[in-house]
Amino acid sequence: MFYRAIGVAVILKPIQYMAIAIMLLLAACGSEFDSRRAGLTPEEAYSGLLSGGIFSAIPEGPVYPADDPFSQAKASLGEMLFWDPLLSGDRDTACASCHHPEHEWADGRALSIGVGGQGLGPNRIGHKLTPLHSPSVLNVAFVGLSGEPSPVFVSGPYFWDGRANTLEAQAIEPIKNEVEMRGSSYTEDDILPEIINRLERNAEYVTLFTLAFGTDVQISEETIARALAAFQRRLITKPTRFDQFLNGDTSALSVAELEGLNTFIDVGCAACHNGPMLSDYAIDPTRPVIRDKPSVRTPSLRNIAKTAPYMHDGSKASLSDAIAFYEDRSDLEVTLDEGDVAPIEAFLKALTDDAIYREVPAQVPSGLAVGGDMNP
């Protein structure tokens, strides 16, 4: 099922192409810029890039599916649920325990600590480690978004293994996971009825659910999921300097960043990291991320400079380390060498938006600690 996004595909006017071409041709005359696109001048390379639809600008606002439209009441309820440890089995862990604005809505850890954990981010301590790195939930509103022929998205996939097809389905899974939020006090079958019972006994939550869904709709797994999804769709990055460049602002990227963009395409990164989110969202078993490990979904590169560590196991501490991992890869069609790392890193930093939503509620309806036990 397709949902139409807010925004349109980027189509530059001929005069914009000419301006870009002139700028790049002048840049190529300097020693700082080295175009290695086989047989192509910088003018030809970038004109082909933009007209070929490899990338497109990010939408100005969130994308909402037709069967779960936006409402402020629903998003406000979802924000409370996101921060409230009432949704965990032992009332000690919230969604925000692993997805916190202080860490760009991730946690800055290689592997996250779920139930029983204390503290925040890299300083969090505990014994229950998740098997995979927790990615940022920034831009989950755009998962599956493509830019051609116009911005549309196919629902999902979510999680590293792509097992959820909607954000609503994804939002409920951590609550059911023993390591992340459920704990050992409840079974997977028991935890949601318990959470629903807790919410039904809380007068403030009853009011919030009524405002969000009306008096005829009960508190349920579906309404919990829809509220959480509504809030998470608010967590987006705005257009970056790269988007400004795609929209025709030829001064938005520096010479070094343009060189990095050129290199990013030269070495094959754009084969998987393309479209408005710089991800094809594919799970391709022919291109394992780590040798002898299962393949995972291609991650988005939006705000990538702010969300270390990297890879699905959090094994790369810096962005340059993550890029360098692809040097001399025989199992991928990549020709990356040591000299390509710095230019690509420069380009990826142009995908950053610092003005993201960072609000933390002063309290949650349960009266529990906001975000769970964040004191080490």
Image: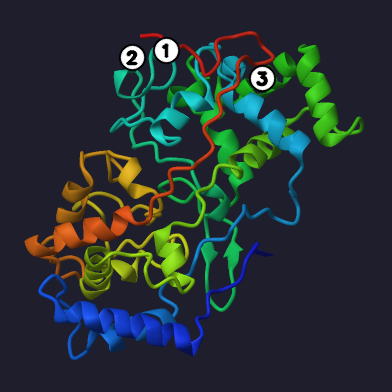
The answer, for residue 195, to whether it is visible in the render is yes
Of residue 297 and residue 41, the one placed in the foreground of this image is 41
Residue drawn at x 64%, y 55% is: 63
Residue drawn at x 70%, y 39% is: 226
Instruction: Tell me which numbered mark, 1 or 3, is placed earlier along the sequence.
Output: 1
Measured as percent of width and height from the top left, residue 35 is found at 18, 79
Q: Along the horizontal axis of the image, is 145 left or right of 363?
A: left
Label 1 and label 3: CA atoms lie apart by 18 Å
Label 2 and label 3: CA atoms lie apart by 23 Å
Residue drawn at x 22%, y 88% is: 41
Q: Mark 2 points at which residue?
A: 126
Label 2 and label 1: CA atoms lie apart by 6 Å
Measured as percent of width and height from the top left, residue 69 is found at 75, 50
Which image quadrant: the N terminus? bottom right
Dividing the picture into quadrants, the one containing residue 261 is: bottom left
SS for dot 1 = loop
Q: How crowded is mark 2: few (under 14 residues within 10 Å), some or many (20 or more)?
A: some
Amino acid type, callout 2 = Gly
Amino acid type, callout 1 = Gly
Q: Do the residues labelled 2 and 3 touch (CB within 8 Å)?
A: no
Q: Name the residue under label 1.
A: 116
Q: Are marks 2 and 1 in contact (CB under 8 Å)?
A: yes
Which image quadrant: the C terminus? top left
Amino acid type, callout 3 = Ile
Q: Mark 3 points at which residue?
A: 195
Please tell me whether mark 2 or mark 3 is closer to you in this view: 2
